[in-house]
Amino acid sequence: MPSSDSVEGTPATGTSDEELLRRVRAGNRHAFRQLVERYEDRVAATIIGMLGPGADADDAGQETFVRLFERVDQFRGESTLGTYLTRIAINQALQVLRKRKRWTRRFFSREAHADELPHPTGDARDDLEREERKQLTYRALQALSEDHRSVVVLRLLQGYSTKETAEILDIPEGTVMSRLYRASNQLKEQLAPLLAPDTP
């Protein structure tokens, strides 16, 4: 998880989350802008970890903060604001993934145009191979169930602890560990071609 020079929500030269939230509830839009600036990197990292960069991720990030603004009176401080926002971000990303699956099943087929692609040579071939590896890794993550992928993104990609991941997803720590174990095994199987040594 991203490190900070001070306790979460109280930067060395800033106002606490609690005070900013109090001002937002009183109608102060500038205070809300400060909260967005404070947490936009964390929200972006979570959503891009789930979705990859692009318009979908931008929309999900914006919607995360819209939801915070709409529910600001409901936030009681039972978790940190960062954890609360990460939970919203994960839920927004999962909604996008479900829509993507429906769209892919109905409309999308990369293989249909494979013969139209030019045959790469030299550096272009190396670039293509790197991009294919990235796409294989991304597709391996996509192949995980939504529950398993959420754990992988939070625990492995974003660096949250087991306890923090459990808090964000509102599940027991044992469930986090079991999902991570199963997801890791599935990823190893999916990515075996990438991990195998090259043969002459």
Image: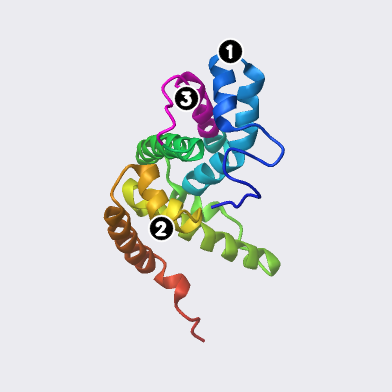
Q: What's the residue at 50%, 33% (across, down)?
A: 60
Q: Position of residue 29 (x, y in %)?
A: 63, 17
Toward the viewer: 48 or 136?
A: 48
Report if residue 70 is visible in the image. Answer: yes
Report the Cα–Cα distance between label 1 and label 3: 16 Å
Quadrant assignment, res 162: bottom left
Disc 1 + disc 3, Cβ < 8 Å: no
Q: CA distance from mark 2 to mark 3?
A: 30 Å
What's the residue at 41%, 55% (across, down)? 152
Nearer to me, 148 or 10: 10
Q: Position of residue 70 (x, y in %)?
A: 47, 19
Residue labelled with disc 3? 67
User: What residue appears at the point 59 percent right and 19 percent down from the top-left corner?
Assistant: 23
Which of the two marks, 1 or 3, is nearer to us in this view?
1
Kind of residue indicated by mark 1: Gly
Q: Residue at x 40, y 40 (%)?
A: 97
Which residue corresponds to mark 2? Answer: 140
Which region shows up in magenta?
A: 59-78
**Label drawn at residue 52:** none
Q: Determine whether, in the image, residue 125 is placed left or right of residue 200.
A: right
Residue wearing tag 1? 27
Task: Tell me where residue 40 sits by quadrant.
Answer: top right
**Element at label 1:** loop
Question: Please, what secondary structure does the residue beneath circle 3 have?
Answer: helix
